[in-house]
Amino acid sequence: MEYKGLIVGLGNPGPKYEDTRHNIGFMLVDRILSVAESRKNMKLEKIDESGDYELWKVKFAGAYRLLAKPLTYMNLSGKAVSKICGRHGLTPEQVMVVHDELDLPVGRMKVKKGGGNNGHNGLESIQDSLNTPNFFRLRLGVGRPADKFKPISEWVLEPFFPENAEHLPAIIEHAVKGLDIYYRRGVGFATQHINSFSIEPPVEKEADKPQESSTDA
């Protein structure tokens, strides 16, 4: 079977990492799987090939595509991606990598092709294994720590703050819709959709406003 692309969600395997910032790529894959399991027309099927990854075929955005979660841990993600591409005849330009992005705040996302890896070890591994940076990336913001002395390696392996975690379902849903638009209408339309999302600040309620004090003359 010929597949019209590969969506790779980056993350680390195991319950220890499930809710961490580094695993937002896994979260997106899990959302597509959840939708596909409830819709027969998406024709979801698990493909058993390797201990280096979990792989599914799914009819997404009108065509059969592969959906993957590397099990090699983040720093060796390229090992899994290159194996999948080699076995299924996919080029780097057919790969969409979904990953956490430090330079975007939570709730912001962007799509791009190629470019630098911004210190992201998973992206660097994929670039090294494919011998090119020219694959697509869906960058989902996780922000940087307020404490500039906090190691990034610790920050990305921590869970989202509760005030951010509550927005994750909406963020993931918008990103999945962005992928659908990308495959159906192209990167231009997808970029417009993806870039439009943000977390709105809470609306200040009247009861929350400080009351002005009055002093009798």
Image (cartoon, rainbow, N blue to C red):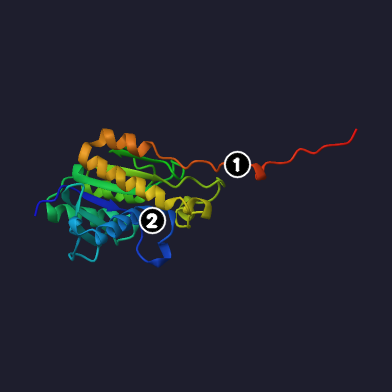
- Residue for point 43% across, 52% down: 168
Foreground residue, 41 or 23? 41
Q: Position of residue 193 (x, y in %)?
A: 33, 37
Q: 10 Å neighbourhood of mark 2: few (<14), some, or many (≥20)?
A: many
Q: Position of residue 72 (x, y in %)?
A: 30, 61
Query: Which numbered tag is attached to residue 23?
Result: 2
Report which quarter residue 135 is drawn in: top left
- Residue for point 37% across, 50% down: 172
Foreground residue, 68 or 169? 169
Label 2 and label 1: CA atoms lie apart by: 32 Å
Q: Is residue 167 left or right of residue 146?
A: left
Q: Is residue 11 left or right of residue 56?
A: right
Q: Position of residue 22 (x, y in %)?
A: 40, 54
Q: Is residue 117 left or right of residue 143?
A: left
Q: 10 Å neighbourhood of mark 1: few (<14), some, or many (≥20)?
A: few
Secondary structure under the numbered disc 2 in the rendered image: helix
Secondary structure under the numbered disc 1 in the rendered image: loop
Quadrant location of the N terminus in the rendered image: bottom left
Query: Which numbered tag is attached to residue 204?
Result: 1
